[in-house]
Amino acid sequence: MTKQEAMRYQEDFLENVQEPTSDEVRGAYNRMNSAFDEYLAAIDDDLFQQAFRYGYEKGFEAASRAKTA
């Protein structure tokens, strides 16, 4: 079998034979997608907290230096 013949079989399968995914697969995908969105939101929150604390500390240090100067 040539690569082109295999590709024709694949195309025929995808267009004419393949059935829609089951509810179980769609549900699992939705749960995975929700978990990934939650993960990304947690990363954003954590990064914001780190940046905020860093900026606060640097601002406090600068204010302390200005008072003693």
Image (cartoon, rainbow, N blue to C red):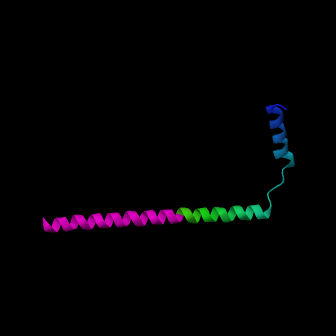
Q: Residue at x 48, y 62 (%)?
A: 44
**Quadrant showing the N terminus:** top right
So how many labels did they put on this image?
0
Q: Is residue 42 left or right of residue 28?
A: left
**Quadrant showing the C terminus:** bottom left
Judge whether 60 appears above or below 1 on screen.
below
Q: Quadrant of residue 31?
A: bottom right
Magenta region's main secondary structure? helix
* Image coordinates for residue 22, horizontal then vertical, percent: 80, 61
In the image as oriented, which residue stretches furthest toward the right?
Answer: 17
Q: Quadrant of residue 54?
A: bottom left
Q: Residue at x 60, y 62 (%)?
A: 36
* Image coordinates for residue 8, horizontal then vertical, percent: 83, 37
Judge whether 18 appears above or below 4 on screen.
below
Q: Residue at x 82, y 31 (%)?
A: 2
* Image coordinates for residue 13, horizontal then vertical, percent: 84, 45
Q: Is residue 49 left or right of residue 41?
A: left
* Image coordinates for residue 38, horizontal then vertical, percent: 57, 66
Nearest the eye: 33 or 2: 2
Q: Is residue 34 magenta?
A: no
Q: Which residues are magenta?
A: 41-69
